[in-house]
Amino acid sequence: MIITIDPSGTSTTGIFCFWNWDKYEIISFSHEKWTKHVDFLVGLIDKHQPEYIAYENSNFLKGAVMNHHFRNLLKVVAGIEWICYEKGIKSKWIGSVFVEKINQNWGKKNKVGGLVYNNKKWSFKGQVLNEHEKDAILVFYLFYKSVLKNDWPFC
């Protein structure tokens, strides 16, 4: 079981839970407090007991504007790492620059099988997505292909 996350500390966290190609779940969680995002992720991880967690992380720490949104995002990322450490779950961060590159170069051209961009809307296998859910799927795509070295089954 794999969980991939597009984290947020002040708005919406997108999550893709993957068991197999017939069983997966796409989730969003919205709240203004970073602690609620971490609490939600703890409950989800306790419920599903994943083998892997992959999440989007910023490559832009040097020179980043450290507003409260960014600080709270960093707290959520630290929470994810702590959860993985405490529970012995393998984790991998995927740089936001790679997610954005796939989004621009492949995603909007419908080259990530199953993920479709049409009429300014994203969908995965027919399910309409918000931006955060789409990014969680792109994190999964990058993790599944680049880290696990698996073929993408929807090509």
Image (tube, rainbow, N blue to C red):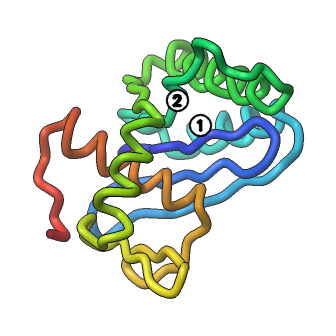
Residue 119, given in percent of the width and then of the height, sits at 51, 87
Q: Is residue 64 above or below residue 101?
A: above
* Residue toward you, 7 or 49: 7
> Which residue is at 51% across, 21% downward?
84
The residue where tag 2 is placed is 57
Mark found first going from the N terminus, 2 or 1: 1
> Does residue 24 appear left or right of residue 143 in this picture?
right
Amino acid type at image mark 1: Asp
Residue 111, given in percent of the width and then of the height, sits at 24, 68
Q: Is residue 67 above or below residue 55?
A: above
Between disc 2 and disc 1, the foreground one is 2
Q: Secondary structure at mark 2?
A: strand
Residue 11, given in percent of the width and then of the height, sits at 79, 48
Residue 95, given in percent of the width and then of the height, sits at 43, 31
Q: Quadrant of residue 154?
A: bottom left
Specify few, some or many for label 2: CA neighbours under 10 Å numbering under 14, 14-19, or 20 or more: many
Q: Quadrant of residue 149?
A: top left
State if disc 1 and disc 2 touch (CB < 8 Å): no
Q: Secondary structure at mark 1?
A: helix
> Which residue is at 55% across, 71% downward?
129
The residue where tag 1 is placed is 46
